[in-house]
Amino acid sequence: MYREFERKGNRDMLKMSFYNGTLDRNIAKDVIANTDKELKYTYGLGYRGPTTHKKPIDKTEAFRIIDTESLLDITEYEDWIHLNAYSDNDMW
């Protein structure tokens, strides 16, 4: 399966999406387990002003989100990792 990464220095940055088929939950869990970066969570489309927007979470919560949310994007930035889950209504 194709995985999308973005080159930053001498390390690839994680960028996965359910939408284009690049979400690999096992790789995502491995990256989260081995990172010291801050983890943030959004539920919904950011431009719509969701009530849960870039909320800091711990690794336990991140693993729960990866296991339970079917519509999920995960993007790694220089200083943090963003888990963005969507509802069925967001996809209309």
Image (cartoon, rainbow, N blue to C red):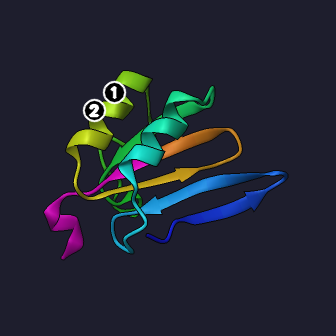
Where the N terminus falls, by quadrant?
A: bottom left
Q: Residue at x 49, y 37 (%)?
A: 30
Q: Residue at x 50, y 34 (%)?
A: 32
Q: Residue furthest right?
A: 9
Q: Which residue is drawn at 15% across and 66% down?
A: 89
**SS category of the residue bearing label 2:** helix
* Circle on res. 33: none
Q: Residue 81 at x, y = what percent?
A: 55, 42
Q: How far apart in space, not on screen, are marks 2 and 1 (Cα)?
A: 5 Å
Q: Are marks 2 and 1 in contact (CB under 8 Å)?
A: yes
The one nearer the camera, 31 or 39, is: 31
10 in magenta: no
Q: Residue furthest left?
A: 88
* Residue 26 occupies quadrant: top left
Position of 52 relative to 88 (above/below): above
Q: What range of the chain is rendered magenta?
A: 83-92
* Residue 47 occupies quadrant: bottom left
Where the C terminus falls, by quadrant?
A: bottom left
Q: Local crowd at mark 1 within 10 Å, few (<14), some, or many (≥20)?
A: few
* Circle on res. 61: 1
- Disc count in the image? 2
Q: Which amino acid does label 1 sit on?
A: Glu
* Residue 90 occupies quadrant: bottom left
Q: What residue type is labelled 2?
A: Arg
Q: Residue 40 at x, y = what percent?
A: 47, 37
Q: Which residue is drawn at 40% across and 40% down?
A: 41
* Residue identified by numbered label 2: 64
Residue 23 placement, left or right of 4 = left
Q: Local crowd at mark 2 within 10 Å, few (<14), some, or many (≥20)?
A: few
Position of 46 relative to 2 (above/below): above
